[in-house]
Amino acid sequence: AEVVPTTIIDEADVEAWAPNTDITYRVIRAIARACKAEPALNAWYDGANESRRLLARVDIGVAAHTEDGLFVPVMRDVAERDEADIRRGLDAMKADVKARGIPPDELKDPTITLSNFGVFGAGRHAALIIIPPQVAIVGSGRIEQRVVPVMGGIEVHRILPLSLTFDHRPVNGGEA
């Protein structure tokens, strides 16, 4: 009732990524860079006052599925962190979720969220749910081998499906 959701879907050819690439890290880095390039995606929206607040720091909520439900711990300031630091943060987050020991402050105030549902083999794309005051959530589907045209021929490449659901009131289609 508080969001006007719109979803854009696309796919990224990730064949050039090394086979042992940390996919979650790469997607987090891509989201951080996208938010820096298009600040409207890293914002909070107050629907009652119709005001949008652009945020400088990218704090990504990372959805984590458990038998007890979904938890969304927040990784702070990901645009300023290197791969090793982000991996440590993801590993600690995973351990905290598993132990049900997530500090309450680590569940608050994400500026954008990642739902990496592809790790469960759960499909290509999704129309995801935005939790206000956030304005966007990115979904990462399962990577598949697909035939793609390449310079007059065809090759099999790894393709990463992506979904971006955004609130169409504070974010327009061009920004998304």
Image: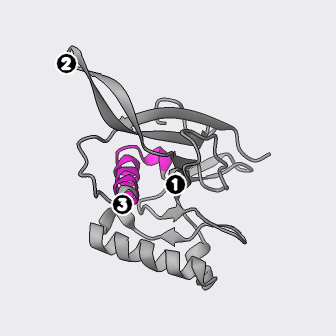
Residue 118 x/y as whole percent: 51, 50
Residue under the image location 48 percent in, 52 percent down: 42
CA gap between label 2 and label 1 equals 31 Å
In the image, 114 versus 13, the foreground residue is: 13
Q: Is residue 28 magenta-colored? A: yes
- Left or right: 79, with 141 as reference point: left
| Label 2 vs 3, first from the N-terminus | 3
CA gap between label 2 and label 3 equals 30 Å
Mark 1 element type? loop
Could one spot residue 170 in this view of the protein?
Answer: no
- Left or right: 58, with 18 as reference point: right
Q: What is the span of residues highlighted in magenta in the rendered image?
A: 24-41
**Which residue position is annotated with label 1?**
116
Residue type, label 1: Asn
Could you tell me which quadrant the N terminus lies in? top right
Residue type, label 2: Met
In the image, 103 versus 109, the foreground residue is: 103
**Which residue position is annotated with label 3?**
25
Mark 2 element type? loop
Mark toward the viewer: 2 or 1: 2
Could one spot residue 119 in this view of the protein?
Answer: yes
Specify the farthest residue to the top.
Answer: 152
Mark 3 element type? helix
**Which residue position is annotated with label 2?**
151
Residue 169 x/y as whole percent: 64, 38
Badge 2, how many Cα within 10 Å: few under 14, some, many 20+?
A: few
| Label 2 vs 1, first from the N-terminus | 1
Q: Main secondary structure of the magenta part?
A: helix
Q: In the rendering, which numbered label is found on residue 76? A: none
